[in-house]
Image (spheres, rainbow, N blue to C red):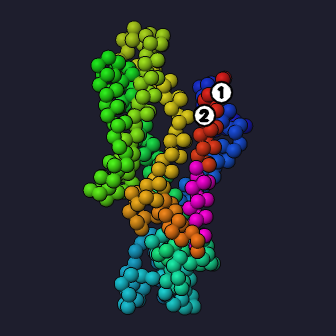
Amino acid sequence: MIDPIEKHLIKNELTLKRYKRFKRDRIAVVSIWVLLAMFFFSFTAELWANNRPHILHYNGETYFPLFKDYHPSDLGRTDIYVMDYRSLEMKEGDWSVWPVIQWDPYESNKAVETYPSAPTKQNWLGTDESGRDVMTRLLYGFRYTMIFAIGAWFFTYLIGITIGSVMGYMGGRVDLVGQRVVEVVESVPYLFVLITIISIFTPNIVLLSALSAFLGWTGIAAYMRAQFLSLRKREYVEAAKSIGATHKRIIAGHILPNALTPIITFAPFAISANVYALSMLDYLGLGLVPPTPSWGEMMAQAQKWATIAGWLVWGPLIAMVVTLTLLNNIGKAVRDAFDAKM
């Protein structure tokens, strides 16, 4: 039976061969499935880790707290201002369906004696120095980490490919000016600029991704420039020019598809580097603003409490190692598939 993806790629023999070669790397295939599972559980984290039940049947009424916010008075509570569903006295006929982990990433467990507290049935990986559930914060933290990693990768490549393509294709003065711009951006002290901007603006995913892209596109631009300088004199490009093809069609339809092929092999490693970069920034206190779930911030806590709270070390450490290993396995397989002689 033909794989659906193979069926789609059957018209492109070279791409199909690369896909089959990639499939033969079982470790990479398993890595993709594990990474997709991590994406699924993190981006649907509210279904698995939350302090509100999915469904609540109380006093003859049915509520959906996960999807709608209820005022305490809606459930007959006039003594509190924020609804605490755990405090409801369930009577006969009342029932509820809770997520697997009954903690919000920003909520502290007030039942434990000290912060941080060791793993228990209520907190599978213990709590941090503010009493927040470690497992929940790891789950939500993956979401923020990958949004930054993929977002920064996308915009870095978008800027780099665009500028590098124009430089390589146009040549002459355009290339000369572009090279000077690249040199200026490369000379900018990344950490100094980062500290300055963060002191002015409140850091968030969008700001950090934009800053990373603005300061990180030069490497891709230089590579694309070299690719275009090499490919613009090929026979098929000259043939396209001879029949009156526009610059836009030549770049987008003839040169760019061939120039992008090696770029694809860099993508998993670039995303992996961005995962590490955000964790480093958060660890130094230059990343996402607390109490946003962040692996880097959790690692900073782990260093602080390592001698008496080992569970704070292993959670984010294993999460980082597993994520980076999966991305590098995929990147290695993609590189081998594209580099191998067909």
Residue at 35%, 43% in the rendered image? 189
> Which region of the structure is painted magenta?
309-324
Front position in the image: 301 or 99: 301
* Residue for point 42% across, 72% down: 68
Quadrant in which the N terminus appears = top right
Q: Is residue 337 left or right of residue 303?
A: right
Q: Check residue 315 for magenta coloring.
A: yes
In the rendered structure, which amino acid carries the disc numbered 1?
Answer: Ala
Q: In the image, is 85 to the left or to the right of 19?
A: left
Which amino acid lies under the numbered mark 2 shown in the image of this protein? Arg
Judging depth in this view, the residue of 142 and 8 nearest the camera is 142
Between disc 2 and disc 1, whose residue precedes? 2
Left or right: residue 181 compared with residue 270? left
Q: Residues within 10 Å of mark 2 (few under 14, many from 20)?
A: many
The circle drawn on residue 340 is 1
Q: What residue sits 42% from the left and 68% below the top?
A: 291
Viewport quadrant of the C terminus: top right
Q: Is residue 320 above or below residue 17?
A: below
Q: Is residue 177 above or below residue 296?
A: above
Secondary structure under the numbered disc 2 in the rendered image: helix
Q: Where in the figure is residue 261, as x and y percent of width and height?
A: 53, 28
Query: In the image, which disc is placed on residue 335?
Result: 2
Q: Position of residue 92 (x, y in %)?
A: 57, 91
Secondary structure type for disc 1: loop
Query: In the current view of this chain or complex, which residue is farthest to the right?
Result: 1
Residue furthest left as drawn: 200
The tally of labels here is: 2
Task: Using the rendered image of the protein, determine whether residue 65 is visible from the camera's viewpoint.
Answer: yes
Residue 159 percent coordinates (x, y): 37, 36
Report whether residue 43 is seen.
Answer: no
Name the magenta segment's main secondary structure.
helix
